[in-house]
């Protein structure tokens, strides 16, 4: 399915909610987030709007809340991004590096498995329910402000081949081509900024 | 010497000269004297005014200073990223008389009532006095425990207040209660006294031996360490209203709510008709209900929100025809309510209601699913009264305390024999129960949306108009209903471009909307689902929340094995009647076993504290609440009203068709065989994945709900996925 900036955030949120439903049923649930830049952003109310008597997403305000909700339900969250330490030596704005440090630190403490790769440019999200790949960074701009384009492959018969390609690629990137994030990655020297 | 005194002295000197001047005519002399008197008077006034002015100017200066401080506070608070409403705004912007409390510990409201504690007089806000300091209540508000007098009431459970307290001689308003018109009087002074230890209570009528209530029962009077808890029984009445803005809600709630109107000005009469007292005596919780004669109350002007709801006659008729269990439960509710009215008229204490009702159920055979004609003929049977009294004797094998007065019981039962249950009455009762249950849902949803406590808001029901009104329970209002009205989902909802262009980001990040909260509360009760699955289900869902509740029940199974076996034997159809009293207990003379059975039998079918039960906040009080609400009927209403949105065929085309038409579609699959559940859920997931994110009518499809329910026979599970266009 064609994905643009108009429906990317909606698919993102729904994929994570579907993962939470699966996790609440005791099924294996996971999410790979691959994006060089990651920052937290507010989930507009109509997207977080969800009625349920089984899983409660009433308090969801930010995207990170949804990710944490998945972890709390027993889902696994794998993330590949760029280390804040690498970003210090680039032209990326200082305030954004601080944002990236903040969100990574938050998710790391909540039990997300985070790895880093300095050459990362790809942007992919894979869950057990589907895969999205395209130009979107996992940031507020990437989800709402920029003009973006990509594809969504739900994990159904017709798209399973493409879905599995993305999943295997994401798994390989995470396991074999990235190093684990360590506490030192958060120690950004304020003077360098 | 100041200028005024100099002027006065000068005038005096002039007057002396004039008196001795022969050239001045009598006429001129009189005119000069009158003018000078006025001049002197004016000078005296000027002198006084100057003194006053100095004070006034000082006061005005202080006021201006405080206003400027207020403005500064508001300016500063607006700059703050997260202003605190309570700390920053309220003290600055809530002038008298419509004041918000300055702190969380201050009461709200404008009317005052004096509380005279043996000569020490305290002035309290009327709302607080009626909520906490009603006759019969006990409070620690003034240090040592204080009891508000209510006099002796042990025989009839009627407290006569006019001789004990100072009431306004003119009634505040009139109230209709159980076919009678009652005059409600405003209390001016409520008299109270300090309670002395040891605290003692009668196990029969729960009267305290405090020199005020002392009853004359022969039942034992026992010492108590904890004072009993008391709750007022409140009736509310709308006296006048001014209607404001109207709104329509979005689907799926639009299938239940036709229209919402904000009421900026509504006058409500709040009457206290009595109180309920609860205490645990010898490990068993006991409750009594005392009625005031006359009722006391006040009028408040406040804000509210009115909901016109859709409960069609066709639905009521259809549900009465198709759901025989619900039909029988409605018959039981009619008898329970009629019995309480008759007992109140005859003067039989309300703590006899449950044993009497239990005996009636056992006599009529209401445990079985029977129709109203059988019930009416059983009631009219000549042996009915004797059989109920026999059953009552068995009932009391499990109860402590005196049995009800035989002659009064007979009068109650004779009156009850006049009851004829018709189709029309069943129809009316079910309609009333559904409307009342919906009022509980809206009250809870308002509290959740606005962040208020249940005590901050209240509800009124207009049966003729199918209208439920939620109002702020304090004169002047407290903003709860206004907040709920503002947070109703509006059309348009989500559009990335709008989001991007929006300057006021706060408008987008709103708290949960009222209609969303109400819809969540209308979904099947998870507690009830777990109970039904545990007792009668053939499919065990894998959802963690259900599994957790099932584990709790399994732990109970070790101690309640006999009770559980007996309930399973009775079946779901008997769950409501067997939960009343001890008639369904296999009378083993073991009171603890009987209690275990009752505990297990009270599963959530018509409501529990986790769904729509609100206890003492209910208009009927916690005592009679269960005979006036029904979650099962609400589930039926929800299923009926969202029927047109349901797709049960797992068909993509059908789902898209309904989405195109209504903007909402609900994919539902029933699962009665655990082996097939996995496959069905996989298909459901697969279909939902193909729908998510698709463009339709310029909007996108979004997964907006997931809930589970039990099948009508309670053996299987229904999985529901809701999709919406946003």
Image (cartoon, helix red, strand yellow):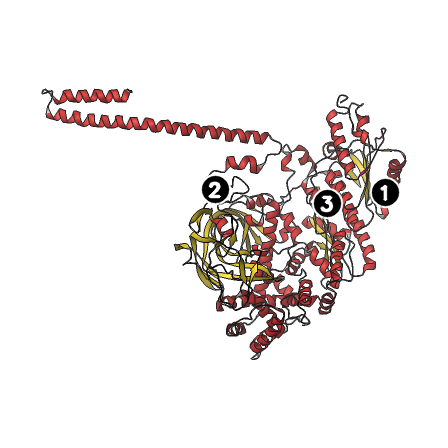
Mark 3 lies on residue? B702
SS under mark 1: helix
Q: How many marks?
A: 3
Residue in front for this viewpoint, B651 or B194: B194
Chain letter, disc 2 residue: B
Mark 1 lies on residue? A163
Q: Distance between the residues labelled 2 and 3?
A: 44 Å
Chain letter, disc 1 residue: A
**Which residue lies at the image location 54% right of the left edge and 59% below the top edge?**
B277
Few, some or many residues within 10 Å of mark 2 (<14, 14–19, 20+)? some
Q: Where, by quadrant of the figure, is residue B231 drawn?
A: bottom right
Magenta region's main secondary structure?
loop
Q: Distance between the residues labelled 3 and 1?
A: 21 Å
- Report whether mark 3 lies on the same chain as mark 1: no
Residue in front for this viewpoint, A33 or B721: A33
Give the farthest residue toward the front.
B198
Q: Nearer the viewer, mark 1 or mark 2?
A: 2
Residue in front for this viewpoint, B525 or B134: B134
Visible in this render: residue B608?
A: yes
Specify which label sits upstream in the sequence, 2 or 3. Answer: 2
Mark 2 lies on residue? B98
Region in magenta: A112-122
Few, some or many residues within 10 Å of mark 3 (<14, 14–19, 20+)? many
Q: Residue B368: image x %, image y %?
A: 66, 71
Visible in this render: residue B620?
A: no
């Amino acid at each position: 399915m064609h994905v643009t900036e108009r429906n990317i955030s909606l698919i993102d949120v729904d994929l994570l909610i579907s993962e939470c439903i699966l996790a609440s049923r005791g099924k294996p649930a996971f999410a790979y987030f691959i994006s060089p830049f990651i920052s937290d952003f507010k989930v507009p109310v109509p997207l977080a709007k969800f009625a349920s008597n089984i899983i409660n997403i009433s308090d969801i305000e930010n995207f990170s809340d949804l990710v944490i909700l998945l972890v709390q339900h027993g889902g696994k969250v794998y993330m590949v991004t760029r280390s804040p330490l690498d970003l210090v030596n680039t032209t990326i704005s200082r305030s954004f590096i601080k944002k990236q440090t903040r969100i990574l630190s938050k998710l790391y403490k909540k039990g997300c498995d985070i790895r880093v790769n300095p050459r990362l440019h790809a942007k992919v999200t894979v869950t057990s329910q589907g895969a999205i790949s395209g130009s979107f960074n996992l940031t507020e701009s990437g989800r709402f402000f920029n003009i973006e384009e990509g594809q969504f492959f739900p994990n159904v018969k017709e798209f399973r081949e493409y879905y599995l390609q993305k999943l295997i690629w994401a798994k390989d990137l995470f396991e074999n081509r990235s190093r684990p994030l360590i506490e030192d990655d958060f120690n950004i020297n304020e003077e360098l900024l | 010497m100041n200028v005024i005194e100099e002027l006065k002295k000068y005038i005096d000197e002039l007057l002396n000269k004039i008196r001795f001047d022969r050239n001045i005519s009598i006429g001129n002399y009189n005119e000069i004297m009158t003018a000078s008197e006025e001049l002197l008077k004016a000078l005296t006034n000027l002198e006084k005014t100057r003194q006053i002015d100095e004070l006034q100017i000082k006061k005005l200066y202080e006021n201006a200073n405080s206003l400027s401080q207020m403005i500064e506070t508001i300016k500063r608070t607006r700059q703050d990223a997260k202003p605190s409403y309570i700390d920053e705004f309220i003290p600055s912007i809530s002038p008298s008389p419509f004041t918000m409390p300055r702190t969380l510990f201050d009461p709200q409201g404008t009317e005052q009532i004096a509380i005279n504690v043996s000569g020490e007089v305290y002035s309290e806000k009327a709302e607080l006095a009626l909520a906490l300091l009603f006759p019969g209540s006990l409070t620690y508000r003034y240090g040592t425990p204080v009891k508000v007098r209510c006099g002796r009431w042990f025989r009839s459970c009627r407290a006569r207040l006019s001789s004990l307290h100072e009431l306004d001689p003119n009634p505040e308003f009139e109230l209709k209660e159980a076919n009678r018109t009652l005059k409600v009087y405003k209390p001016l002074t409520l008299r109270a006294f300090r309670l002395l230890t040891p605290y003692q209570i009668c196990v029969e009528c729960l009267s305290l031996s405090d020199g005020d209530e002392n009853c004359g029962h022969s039942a034992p009077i026992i010492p108590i360490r904890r004072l009993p808890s008391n709750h007022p029984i409140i009736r509310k009445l709308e006296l006048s209203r001014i209607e404001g803005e109207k709104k329509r809600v979005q689907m799926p709630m639009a299938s239940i709510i036709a229209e919402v109107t904000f009421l900026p000005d509504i006058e409500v009469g709040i009457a206290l008709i009595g109180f309920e007292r609860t205490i645990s005596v010898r490990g068993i919780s006991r409750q009594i209900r005392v009625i005031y004669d006359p009722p006391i109350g006040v009028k408040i002007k406040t804000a509210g929100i009115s909901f016109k709801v859709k409960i069609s006659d066709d639905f009521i008729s259809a549900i009465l025809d198709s759901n025989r269990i619900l039909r029988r439960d409605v018959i039981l509710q009619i008898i329970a309510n009629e019995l309480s009215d008759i007992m109140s008229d005859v003067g039989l204490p309300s703590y006899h209601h449950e044993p009497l009702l239990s005996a009636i159920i056992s006599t009529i055979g209401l445990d079985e699913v029977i129709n109203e004609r059988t019930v009416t003929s059983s009631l009219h049977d000549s042996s009915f009264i004797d059989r109920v009294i026999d059953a009552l004797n068995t009932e009391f094998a499990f109860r402590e305390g005196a049995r009800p007065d035989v002659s009064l019981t007979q009068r109650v039962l004779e009156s009850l024999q006049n009851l004829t249950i018709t189709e029309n009455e069943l129809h009316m009762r079910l309609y009333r129960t559904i409307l009342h249950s919906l009022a509980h849902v809206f009250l809870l949803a308002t509290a959740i949306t606005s962040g208020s406590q249940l005590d901050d808001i209240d509800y009124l029901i207009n049966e003729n108009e199918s209208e439920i009104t939620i109002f702020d329970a304090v004169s002047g209002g407290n903003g709860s209903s206004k907040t709920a009205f503002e947070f109703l989902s509006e059309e348009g909802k989500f559009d990335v471009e709008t989001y991007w262009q929006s300057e006021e980001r706060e408008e987008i990040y709103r708290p949960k909307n009222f209609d969303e909260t109400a819809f969540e509360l209308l979904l099947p009760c998870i507690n009830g689902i777990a109970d039904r699955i545990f007792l009668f289900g053939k499919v065990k869902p894998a959802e963690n929340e259900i599994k957790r509740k099932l584990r709790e029940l399994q732990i109970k199974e070790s101690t309640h094995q006999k009770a559980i076996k007996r309930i399973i034997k009775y079946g779901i159809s008997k769950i409501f009647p067997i939960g009343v009293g001890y008639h369904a207990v296999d009378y083993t003379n073991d009171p603890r076993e009987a209690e275990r059975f009752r505990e297990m039998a009270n599963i959530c079918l018509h409501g529990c504290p986790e769904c729509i039960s609100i206890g003492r906040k209910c208009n009927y009080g916690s005592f009679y609440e269960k005979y006036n609400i029904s979650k099962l009927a609400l589930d039926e209403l929800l299923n009926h009203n969202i029927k047109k949105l349901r797709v049960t065929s797992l068909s993509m085309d059908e789902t898209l068709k309904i989405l195109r038409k209504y903007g909402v579609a609900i994919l539902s699959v029933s699962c009665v065989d655990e082996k097939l559940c996995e496959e069905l859920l996989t298909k459901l997931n697969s279909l939902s994945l193909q729908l998510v994110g698709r463009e339709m009518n310029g909007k996108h499809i979004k997964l907006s709900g997931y809930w589970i329910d039990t099948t009508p026979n309670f053996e299987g599970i229904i999985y529901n996925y809701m999709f919406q266009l946003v």
